Image (cartoon, rainbow, N blue to C red):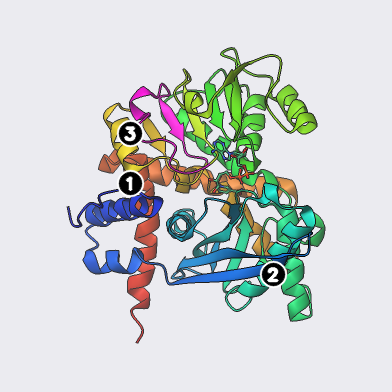
């Protein structure tokens, strides 16, 4: 082993452990590890906001720009009460490998605000988003760093960011964010892209093992943009979605849930609780329930040594970023459970974000069919590249995906050299 193993597993330590492992496998050396293990830039802002009662609160916000060897920094903005800098740094690193793995001309970034958005009114949230954007203006730009949606942010927040940036520039700048509403330059297919990508990668994984989606039992943690779309598409494709959940808990039915009906219920009641045709299940129990495929699609570090030995699924598709800790994964690996890593499984979002950016820069817009076709082509090609490495080099899916992604970034870093 080239590097000493960190003693504990924060998401950042986990990301660095995985980087160290792949650097070791590829023989890239300590100097390359040193360059790639640290972000280029971390900006912390403290954004003051006038609350509805007239008082002023100050919110901490961050933007971590990890690496731009291949192109502008790209990555989501998350509004969450537990979000902090180390987590954003880990997620920014993942974005760098993810963009490189699927061949996009982007580097990695991540950021957001430490806030529970449920505690704010819409007006307060808008003022916070706009002030945070204005505080980031020195470091974001369509050619520098392009934010996107993540946990608790979506098209509404992206429109506020686009408007704030544009007002400050004096002209409309659609390329400043992706995941915007269609009417201000968003791409058709972007809102479903991450979930659609998860289903494409699941299809390819099952095909790799000689299996089919129809009848496959799938449990999904998280029912937001990624988990909700994934559940709906898999249901339409004939999979048995045996459980879904949100932050309050979930519902399960071993015969498969009627996801169309669950979606209607969720839209009407904004909760999965009191849904009639299913049992209630906690988020902890959902992860260890009987199923063929487990899809964590909520937050990071949910699969750990605490539960890895009780997971029943044969395949885990990481729709969330970093849901499995390295120690949890070591147990899964010993048990022969396949983990398809986040940087491949959820790359559909950034692929269509790239399409949105290209369309915004060229002012030429594509049909939804064209977006979905191009997405499928990129993801199936990337899956094949990773699967070939799994077979030929006897690597796990994570190490195979990392060696493609990290390898491309390391090569660009080597060729570009070191300034000065
Ligand atoms: P979202 O805010 O739309 O949904 C998050 C879901 O997780 C919600 O259903 C929420 O109730 C649930 N949740 C929150 N806390 C939870 C907890 N403690 N236990 C169980 N469930 C909980 O966010 P999203 O955009 O769907 O993102 C989900 C994951 O996918 C994140 O890891 C994100 O980084 C990743 N991701 C998102 C995109 C994208 O395009 N939105 C792209 C790539 C990766």
The residue that mark 1 highlights is: 399
> Foreground: 223 or 97?
223
Magenta segment, which residues?
299-319
**Contact check, label 1 and label 3, Cβ < 8 Å:** no
Q: Cα distance, mark 2 to mark 1?
A: 40 Å
Mark 3 element type: loop
Measure the C-alpha gap from mark 1 to mark 3.
20 Å
SS at mark 2 in the image: helix
Measured as percent of width and height from the top left, residue 373 is found at 64, 45
Residue shown at 69% from the left, 19% from the top: 258
User: Which mark identifies residue 114?
Assistant: none
Instruction: Where is residue 290? Give x, y as percent.
Output: 46, 17
Q: Is residue 126 visible?
A: yes
Label 3 – label 2 distance at C-alpha: 41 Å
Query: Magenta stretch mostly in which secondary structure?
Result: loop
Q: Is residue 162 above or below residue 275?
A: below
Q: Is mark 1 within 8 Å of ligand 1?
A: no
- Determine crowd level at label 3: few under 14, some 14-19, many 20+ residues with C-alpha closer than 10 A: some
* Mark toward the viewer: 1 or 3: 3
Which residue corresponds to mark 3? 305
Q: Is residue 168 above or below residue 297?
A: below
Q: Identify the residue at image location x=30%, y=52%.
A: 17
- Spot occupied by residue 283 in the image (x, y as percentages of width and height): 52, 29
Question: Helix or strand or loop: what does disc 1 sit on?
Answer: helix
User: What numbered label is drawn on residue 131?
Assistant: 2
Mark 1 or mark 3: whose residue is earlier in sequence: 3
Q: Residues within 10 Å of mark 2 (few under 14, many from 20)?
A: some
Q: Nearer the viewer, residue 256 or 58?
A: 58
Q: Residue at x 63, y 35 (%)?
A: 223
Is label 3 in contact with label 2 (beta carbons under 8 Å)?
no
């Amino acid at each position: 082993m080239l590097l000493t193993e960190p003693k504990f597993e924060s998401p950042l330590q986990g990301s660095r452990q995985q980087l160290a492992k792949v650097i070791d496998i590829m023989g890239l050396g300590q100097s390359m590890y040193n360059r790639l293990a640290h972000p280029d830039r971390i900006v912390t802002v403290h954004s003051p906001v006038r609350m509805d009662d007239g008082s002023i609160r100050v919110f901490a916000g961050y933007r971590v720009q990890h690496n731009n060897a291949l192109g502008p920094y790209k990555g989501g903005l998350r509004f969450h009460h537990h979000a902090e800098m180390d987590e954003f740094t880990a997620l920014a690193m993942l974005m760098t490998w993810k963009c490189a793995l699927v061949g996009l001309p982007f580097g990695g970034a991540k950021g957001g605000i430490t806030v529970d958005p449920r505690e704010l009114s819409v007006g307060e949230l808008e003022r916070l988003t706009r002030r945070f954007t204005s505080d980031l203006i020195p470091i974001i730009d369509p050619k520098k760093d392009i934010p996107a949606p993540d946990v608790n942010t979506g098209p509404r927040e992206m429109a506020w960011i686009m408007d704030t940036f544009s007002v400050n520039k004096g002209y409309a700048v659609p390329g400043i964010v992706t995941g915007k509403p269609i009417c201000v330059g968003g791409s058709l297919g972007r809102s479903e892209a991450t979930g659609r990508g998860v289903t494409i990668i699941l299809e390819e994984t099952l095909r790799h093992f000689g299996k089919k989606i129809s009848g496959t039992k799938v449990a999904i943690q998280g029912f937001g943009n990624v988990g909700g779309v994934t559940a709906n598409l898999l249901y339409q494709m004939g999979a048995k979605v045996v459980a879904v959940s949100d932050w309050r808990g979930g519902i399960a039915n071993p015969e498969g849930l009627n996801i169309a009906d669950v979606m209607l219920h969720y839209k009407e009641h904004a909760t999965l609780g009191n849904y009639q045709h299913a049992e209630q299940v906690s988020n902890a129990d959902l992860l260890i329930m009987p199923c063929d495929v487990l899809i964590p699609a909520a937050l990071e570090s949910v699969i750990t040594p605490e539960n890895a030995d009780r997971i029943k699924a044969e395949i885990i598709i990481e729709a969330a970023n970093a849901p499995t800790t390295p120690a949890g994964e070591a147990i899964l690996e010993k048990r022969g459970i396949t983990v398809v890593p986040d940087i491949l499984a959820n790359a559909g979002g950034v692929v269509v974000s790239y399409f949105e950016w290209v369309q915004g820069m060229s002012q030429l817009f594509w049909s939804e069919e064209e977006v979905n076709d191009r997405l499928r082509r990129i993801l199936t090609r990337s899956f094949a590249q990773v699967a070939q490495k799994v077979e030929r080099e006897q690597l796990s899916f994570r190490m195979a995906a990392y060696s493609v992604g990290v390898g491309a970034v390391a090569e660009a870093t080597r060729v570009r050299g070191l300034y000065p």
